[in-house]
Every structure is written in structure tokens, then in C-alpha cells.
């Protein structure tokens, strides 16, 4: 019984890690595109 519980916890941890990596990647991609947009608009003014 405890083996199954440990396995479920490990899978849950792996899913959380995968979601965290995806979020960090998305923030980096969106952050650089937002920085480019802000630089472009401030240059326009």
C-alpha cells in the first residue's frame, strides 16, 4: 500500500515539475517579446 502511495506522490511531483518548466519557458518567451514591444513603442514616442 505505501509503495502505491509513494508512486502516486512521485508522479504528482513529476507533473508539477513539468508544469513549472513549461511556465518558466512561457514567461521567458513572453517576457522577451513584451520587452521588444515596449522598446519599440518607447522608441516610437
Image (cartoon, grey):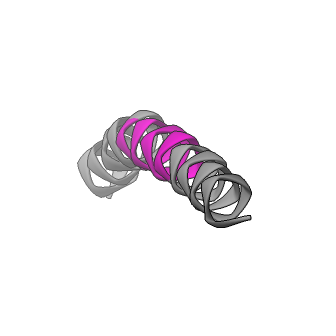
Between 31 and 16, the one nearer to me in the picture: 16
Left or right, residue 36 beside residue 17 = left
Left or right, residue 33 beside residue 26 = left
Q: Residue at x 70, y 56 (%)?
A: 8
Q: Main secondary structure of the magenta part?
A: helix
Q: Residue at x 44, y 40 (%)?
A: 21
Residue 18 among those drawn in magenta: yes
Please give the range of residues in magenta: 17-28
Q: Position of residue 40 (x, y in %)?
A: 35, 40
Between 39 and 7, the one nearer to me in the picture: 7
Left or right, residue 20 beside residue 5 = left
Q: Position of residue 29 (x, y in %)?
A: 44, 33
Q: Residue at x 28, y 56 (%)?
A: 42
The quarter holding residue 37 reads: top left
Q: Position of residue 6 (x, y in %)?
A: 57, 59
Between 21 and 12, the one nearer to me in the picture: 12
Left or right, residue 18 beside residue 8 = left
Amino acid at each position: 500500500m505505501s509503495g502505491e502511495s509513494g508512486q502516486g506522490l512521485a508522479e504528482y511531483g513529476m507533473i508539477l515539475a513539468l508544469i513549472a518548466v513549461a511556465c518558466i519557458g512561457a514567461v521567458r518567451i513572453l517576457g522577451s517579446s513584451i520587452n521588444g514591444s515596449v522598446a519599440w513603442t518607447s522608441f516610437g514616442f
